[in-house]
Amino acid sequence: MRVLQIHNEYALPGGEDAAVAAEAELLAGAGHRVLRMRVRNRASGPVAALALAGAPWNPVRYRDARRAIRTFRPDVAHLHNTWFSLSPSVVDALRAEGVPVVMTLHNYRLLCANGLLFRDGEACTDCLGSHPWHAVRHGCYRGSAAQSAVAATTIALGRARSTWDSVDRFLVPSRFVKDTYVRAGFVPDRISVKPNVVTDPGPRQARPSASRSVLCVSRLSEEKGVAGLLEAWRAAGESLGGLRLRVIGDGPQRAVLRRAAPEGVDITGWVDKAELYRTLRTARAVVVPSECYETFGLAAVEAMAAGLPVLGADIAGPAEVVGALGSRWLVPPADPAALAAALPVLADDSAVDSAGARAREHFERGYAPGEVLRLLLAAYRDVVSGT
């Protein structure tokens, strides 16, 4: 199958970019031809400002997309992120060329100016089932009313022009995301749940209890809840039995979190995927303290692939993943006291070994690359055949 993969990469690469790249590799490895049409946002400067101004509809990207379609002649186009350099104009290009379209909804960008459903330190659904102009009043995108107006205009224009009606099938990484979009008015039958691709590192060589290292793999930003984790780790104190916490990640809160880190906590920045998987295979457990409506829970699934138990926030996508281990491993979000009370389970050798084994089984059943590929190709076949 010939697949045109279209994705607008972020100025600071993150989990979404990694998921898109992994999916392209999965398809290519299975013998399918993939052409990747990619652009990358600039963080700031005149070029970034010009691209942002064209976010509602970019004529240059429209022409680029039509040119790629005519050159490659895909059987199907798989659209990922369009914000902000690509713009929804690429959807019009696909429609004009008669290409079947699958789109993965990695975030809430079609509903929310910042794509997170998160504002002022907590989850926010003001624009859900309403209109996007609340974002201007609150400065939801980068704290700027002007930039939020561009984001809101993009959402409103997409609705007014019925842009997203041209997408034949939406894919979402969790049931929570599907339910959220249905609440916003999207047709349920056009949305299928398909997890993101996660590399299978293979069974671990040692039991989780052999390690004293607990990991948190996260972007260091407010909605990820790492500050609350550090507070909870300090409060848990001696009940952790001398375990150490390593926070792998980067982001706007890195300097603040480093200053706030208690004894036994290291904040080490990002590592490449190969190093991450090596670290997971020799760790004891992973904590996912997110406070926002995460769409998938990549860190949780990667941990489970490595046979690690996950102590996670009971919210959105991560809750669907971690819930398979039982209620003991779920903690109310944005509640450092509750997290501190739950953390001692990580010092229980028997508990972490048992949960780690269940985690690996859960990964093999629902998240292994072969299963994800099966679901992806099924969606492609459906839209190509018109079913």
Image (cartoon, rainbow, N blue to C red):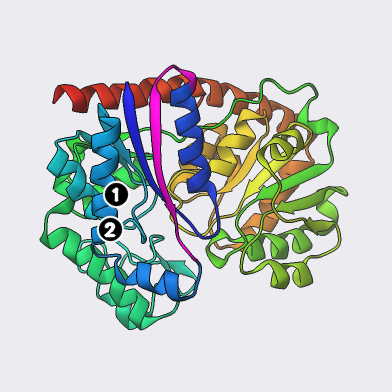
Left or right, 256 with respect to 374, comes to right
Residue 187 or residue 32, whichever sits in front? 32
Residue at which label 2 appears: 60
Which image quarter: residue 36?
top left
The residue type indicated by label 2 comes to Val
Total count of labels: 2
Real-space Cα separation, disc 1 to disc 2, in angstroms:
6 Å
Residue 91 or residue 172, whichever sits in front? 91
The spot of residue 12 in percent (x, y) is 55, 59
Left or right, 271 with respect to 326, comes to right
Residue pictured at 41% horizontal, 60% vertical: 116
Instruction: Pick the quarter of the image with the N terminus.
Output: top left
Above or below: residue 266 compared with residue 3? below
Residue pictured at 24% horizontal, 75% vertical: 133
Q: Using the image, tell me which numbered label, if any, was put on residue 64.
A: 1
Q: Do the residues labelled 1 and 2 touch (CB within 8 Å)?
A: yes
Residue 68 or residue 240, whichever sits in front? 68
The spot of residue 67 in percent (x, y) is 26, 43
Q: Is residue 36 shown in magenta? A: yes
Residue pictured at 46% horizontal, 43% vertical: 296
The residues colored magenta run 29-42
Above or below: residue 358 compared with residue 186? above
Left or right, 72 with respect to 36, comes to left
The spot of residue 253 in percent (x, y) is 64, 69
The residue type indicated by label 1 comes to Asp
